[in-house]
Image (tube, rainbow, N blue to C red):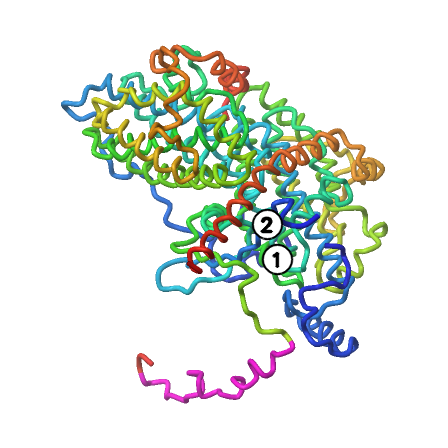
C-alpha cells in the first residue's frame, strides 16, 4: 500500500529553545500532515511541562546531514586547532576575572 | 519516597543529561491567582458573580468530560496529546471557577461539591457542551464553536470588576486561543480534505446549528463585563472566517451554523437539559457517590 | 519496515564489514553511544526495533487500563492528575516510536504489526482495573517497575533510545508518586477504602513481578543484549531491585504483599521472594490474558476509525502544497 493512500503523515524533527539565550536543541520527532500541525503537535508533545519558549519543526526529509564515514574530513581538521580553546592559554592563577 | 529509592545501588544516574532538573525540564509554573485578593469587592453583585462562575465552570467541566471520553480513541497518538491538553485546560478552568463560585455564593463549597454532589437540573452549562461525543468532525466543530465563543467571553471578562474572575478569565483566554486555533486548523483540514471529511464536517455543523442560539444569546457573564451582543458578533465573525477558509461556507453569506434548523427552545442555563447530561454526570459522579465518606 | 539490513545508512559507501564491526564494537566497548547513521550489525538494529517498538506499544496500550477511570475519577484533582498521566503515556509512546523511526522503522507499520498481533506489548496491561484503588497501585507497582527497568536504559548503547528514556524517566517519577500518594490518602480514609487498596495490591503484585520478563536462565536473548549494552542489567537483578524497593514502601503504607515467602535475607542483603507463576506469564504473552482481545480491539478500532481523519489531513496538505506551487509558477 502506498503511503499516500493510507494517509501517512510525514516525519518532522523538533527543536526547542529551552529559554531565552539558549540555542534551539533537537528534542525528537513527530508525525504531522502539515507545518501548522507539526508546531501544535510539538507544543503538546515536547513542551507540555513548560520546557520551551520557541519551537522549530522541520520536515525530516529536508535535513542535510553529514555521513558518519565522512567524520574525518568534516571534523578531524578542527581536532588539532587547540588554539581555538580557552584552556590553550596559560594564565597565572592570580589574574582575576579571566 | 525519596530519590534514593529510585537509585537502589546508586549506580544509575537518572539525570544523565546533567541539567539537574528534578522532575521535568520546565520551571516557572505559576498560580494564576497568586496575590489576588479573594474577597468579593464592593459593588459586585455576589449572587450574580457566583451564577456566572457556575455557568462557565459547568461549561468547562462538561466539555472536559466529553474530551476525556476520547482517551485512547483519537485518530492519531499526537491528537491524544492535543485533546488531553485541551481537556486539562478546561478542567483547570472549571476548578478555578467553582472555587470562586463557592466563595461568592457564601456557601464555602469546594470544587468537588459542585462537580460531584449536584443533580443534572442543578447544572447550568449550555446544552451544546453536553451533546454526545459523535465522530472526530463533531468534536472539532463543537470545540471550534465553544472555544471561539468562550474566548470572546473570557477576553471581555479579563476586565471584570471582580479581580479573581478577571484573573481566571485572562488565564483562560490564553488557553482558549490555542483551543480555537487547534479547532480552526482541523476545521480547514477536514473541510478541504476528502469528500468524506467535508461531508462529516457539514453533518457536524448541521447537528450543532440548532444549539448555537443558546450561546449567542447567553447573558451569564453580561453583568460581569461581557456584553452579549459584542460576544455574539465576534463569535459569528470568527466562525464565518474559519468556515470560509474551510470551504464550508454557503453562497448566501449565511454561516452554515445558523441554518437550516431552528433553535431548540429553552436553555441549560436554567437547568433544562437534554437527556444526554444525566448519563454523563452519572458516570462522572459514580465513584464519588458510591463512597461519600471516602478521601481521595 | 521489515527487520532487515535495509537501513537509512545504505547511501554510505560500504567499508569492509570487518572494519565496520570493529568500529562498532570499539564504540560500545568505550561506552560511547551508537547514533542513527552509524553502521551497526543487522541483528543489533533488529533487536532494537523489536524492543523499542514493544516498549512504545506498551505505552500506547498502557493508556487503556487507567484511561477508563478518567471520566469516573472521584475528585477533580484526581481527575486532572490521571488525565495528565495518561496523556504522558501517549507522549512516551511517541518518544519511543520516534526513536524506532531513527532506525528506519515506520510508525504506521509498527502500529499495524501491533494490531495484527505480530508485535507484543507488556503483558501487565492485559489485566483489568476493577476499582479506583487500581489507579494507585498501577502508579506504585507498574510505574515503579517501569522506572527500575528504564533508569538503566537511559544509558543504553543506542543514543536515541537512551535520550527518549531520559525524558520518560523524568516524567514517570510523577506517575509513581501520584499513585503512592493516592494509596496513602485512601489508607487514611474509610475501612472500605483500605480493603480496596489491599485487594488491588493482591491482584497486581504478581503481574508486576512478571513485568521484568522470564528468569535469566530462561531468557535466551538477554546475553547478547547485555553484550551490546542495549540492556544493562538482567531480568532477575531488576526484579530483585524492585522487590527491595517496594517492601519498605508497603510497610509504610500498611499493606501486605501477598507472598508468604517474602523475607529479608541478611546474608544476601536482599529480600527473598517466591517465583511468580511463569506459566501464567506465557499464557498472557501468547494472547490468553484477561483483557488481551479487548485491548487490541480498542487500539485497532481507534486506528481504523481514525483513518479517514489522517487521509483528510494528508489530502489537504497535498492540495495546499500544489496550490502554493501553482501560485509560484503563475
For the residue pair C115 and C201, the one nearer the viewer reads as C115
Residue B86, position in %: x, y?
Answer: 44, 36
In the image, residue B202 above or below residue C264: above
| Residue A73: in magenta span | yes
A10 or A30: which is nearer to us?
A10
Crowding at mark 1 (Cα within 10 Å: few <14, some 14-19, many 20+):
many
Dot 1: chain letter: C
Q: Secondary structure at mark 1?
A: loop
Same chain under badges 2 and 1? The reply is no
Residue at image location 56% in from the left, 70% down from the top: A65
Residue at x-position 23% and y-position 25%: B229
SS for dot 2: helix
**Viewer-side label of 2, 1:** 1
Of all residues, the one furthest to the front in this rendering is C330
Residue B98: which numbered mark, if any?
none
Q: Quarter of the image containing the C terminus of chain A?
A: bottom left
Give the labeled residue for mark 2: B6
Reading the image, the residue beneath label 1 is C154
Chain under numbered label 2: B
Q: Position of residue B104 (x, y in %)?
A: 26, 21
Identity of the residue drawn at 76% across and 55% down: C2
Instruction: Specify start and end residues of the magenta stretch as a single range.
Output: A69-95
Q: Position of residue C93 (x, y in %)?
A: 61, 46
Vertical relation: B74 (above or below) B228:
below
Can you say whether B199 is above or below A16 in the image? above
- The Cα–Cα distance between marks 2 and 1, rounded to whole angstroms, is 13 Å
Asked whether B76 or B283 is in front, the reply is: B76
Mark 2 crowdedness (10 Å alpha carbons): few <14, some 14-19, many ≥20: many
Is residue B1 something that shows in the picture? no
Q: Is residue A9 left or right of residue C280?
A: left
Left/right of residue B112 with respect to residue A2 in the rendered view:
left
Amino acid at each position: 500500500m502506498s503511503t499516500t493512500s493510507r494517509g501517512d503523515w510525514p516525519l518532522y524533527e523538533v527543536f526547542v529553545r529551552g529559554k531565552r539565550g539558549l540555542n534551539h536543541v533537537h528534542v525528537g520527532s513527530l508525525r504531522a500532515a502539515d507545518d501548522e500541525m507539526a508546531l501544535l503537535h510539538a507544543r503538546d508533545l515536547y513542551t507540555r511541562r513548560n520546557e520551551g519558549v520557541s519551537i522549530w519543526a522541520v520536515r525530516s526529509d529536508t535535513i542535510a546531514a553529514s555521513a558518519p564515514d565522512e567524520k574525518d574530513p568534516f571534523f578531524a581538521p578542527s581536532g588539532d586547532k587547540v588554539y581555538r580553546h580557552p584552556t590553550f592559554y596559560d594564565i597565572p592563577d592570580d589574574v582575576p576575572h579571566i | 519516597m525519596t530519590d534514593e529509592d529510585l537509585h537502589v545501588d546508586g549506580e544509575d544516574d537518572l539525570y544523565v543529561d546533567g541539567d539537574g532538573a528534578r522532575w521535568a525540564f520546565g520551571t516557572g509554573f505559576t498560580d494564576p491567582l497568586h496575590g489576588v485578593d479573594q474577597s468579593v469587592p464592593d459593588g459586585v453583585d455576589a449572587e450574580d458573580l457566583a451564577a456566572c462562575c457556575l455557568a462557565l465552570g459547568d461549561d468547562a467541566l462538561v466539555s472536559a468530560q466529553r474530551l476525556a471520553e476520547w482517551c485512547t480513541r483519537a485518530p492519531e497518538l499526537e491528537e491524544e496529546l492535543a485533546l488531553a491538553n485541551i481537556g486539562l485546560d478546561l478542567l483547570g478552568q472549571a476548578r478555578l471557577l467553582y472555587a470562586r463560585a463557592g466563595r461568592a455564593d457564601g456557601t464555602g463549597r469546594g470544587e468537588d461539591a459542585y462537580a460531584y454532589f449536584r443533580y443534572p437540573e442543578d447544572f447550568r452549562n449550555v446544552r451544546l457542551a453536553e451533546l454526545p461525543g459523535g465522530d472526530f468532525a463533531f468534536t472539532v466543530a463543537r470545540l471550534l464553536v465553544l472555544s471561539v465563543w468562550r474566548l470572546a467571553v473570557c477576553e471581555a471578562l479579563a476586565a471584570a470588576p471582580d479581580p479573581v474572575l478577571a484573573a481566571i478569565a485572562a488565564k483562560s483566554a490564553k488557553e482558549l486561543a490555542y483551543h480555537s486555533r487547534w479547532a480552526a486548523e482541523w476545521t480547514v483540514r477536514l473541510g478541504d480534505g476528502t469528500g468524506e471529511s467535508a461531508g462529516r464536517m457539514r453533518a457536524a455543523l448541521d447537528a450543532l446549528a440548532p444549539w448555537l442560539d443558546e450561546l449567542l444569546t447567553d447573558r451569564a457573564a453580561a453583568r460581569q463585563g461581557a456584553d452579549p451582543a459584542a460576544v455574539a458578533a465576534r463569535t459569528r465573525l470568527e466562525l464565518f472566517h474559519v468556515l470560509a477558509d474551510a470551504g464550508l461556507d454557503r453562497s448566501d453569506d449565511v454561516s452554515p451554523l445558523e441554518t437550516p434548523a431552528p433553535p431548540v427552545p429553552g436553555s441549560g442555563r436554567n437547568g433544562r437539559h437534554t437527556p444526554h447530561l444525566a448519563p454523563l454526570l452519572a458516570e462522572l459522579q459514580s465513584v464519588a457517590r458510591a463512597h461519600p465518606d471516602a478521601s481521595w | 519496515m521489515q527487520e532487515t539490513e535495509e537501513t537509512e545508512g545504505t547511501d554510505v559507501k560500504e567499508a569492509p564489514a570487518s572494519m565496520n564491526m570493529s568500529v562498532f564494537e570499539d564504540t560500545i566497548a568505550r561506552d560511547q553511544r551508537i547514533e542513527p547513521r552509524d553502521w551497526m550489525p543487522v541483528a543489533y538494529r533488529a533487536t532494537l526495533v523489536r524492543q523499542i517498538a514493544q516498549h512504545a506499544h506498551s505505552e500506547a496500550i498502557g493508556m487503556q487500563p487507567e484511561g477508563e477511570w478518567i471520566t469516573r475519577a472521584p475528585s477533580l484533582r484526581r481527575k486532572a492528575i490521571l488525565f495528565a498521566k495518561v496523556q504522558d503515556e501517549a507522549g512516551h509512546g511517541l518518544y519511543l516510536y520516534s526513536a524506532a523511526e531513527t532506525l528506519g522503522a515506520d510508525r504506521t507499520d509498527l502500529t499495524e504489526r501491533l494490531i495484527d498481533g505480530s508485535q507484543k506489548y507488556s503483558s501487565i496491561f492485559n489485566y483489568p482495573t476493577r476499582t479506583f484503588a487500581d489507579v494507585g497501585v498501577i502508579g506504585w507497582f507498574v510505574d515503579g517497575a517501569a522506572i527500575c527497568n528504564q533508569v538503566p536504559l537511559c544509558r543504553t548503547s543506542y543514543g536515541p533510545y537512551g535520550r527518549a528514556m531520559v525524558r520518560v524517566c523524568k516524567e514517570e517519577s510523577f506517575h509513581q508518586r501520584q499513585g503512592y500518594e493516592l494509596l496513602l490518602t485512601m489508607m487514611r480514609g474509610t475501612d472500605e477504602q483500605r480493603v480496596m487498596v489491599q485487594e488491588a495490591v493482591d491482584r497486581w503484585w504478581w503481574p508486576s513481578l512478571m513485568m521484568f520478563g522470564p528468569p535469566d536462565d530462561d531468557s535466551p536473548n538477554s546475553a547478547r543484549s547485555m553484550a551490546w549494552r542495549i540492556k544493562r542489567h538482567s531480568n532477575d537483578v531488576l526484579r530483585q531491585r524492585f522487590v527491595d524497593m517496594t517492601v519498605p514502601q508497603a510497610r509504610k503504607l500498611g499493606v501486605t504483599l501477598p507472598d508468604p515467602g517474602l523475607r529479608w535475607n541478611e546474608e544476601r542483603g536482599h529480600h527473598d521472594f517466591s517465583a511468580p507463576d511463569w506459566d501464567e506469564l506465557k499464557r498472557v504473552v501468547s494472547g490468553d490474558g484477561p483483557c488481551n482481545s479487548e485491548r487490541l480491539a480498542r487500539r485497532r478500532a481507534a486506528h481504523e476509525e481514525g483513518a479517514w481523519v489522517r487521509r483528510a489531513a494528508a489530502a489537504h496538505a497535498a492540495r495546499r502544497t500544489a496550490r502554493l506551487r501553482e501560485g509560484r509558477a503563475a
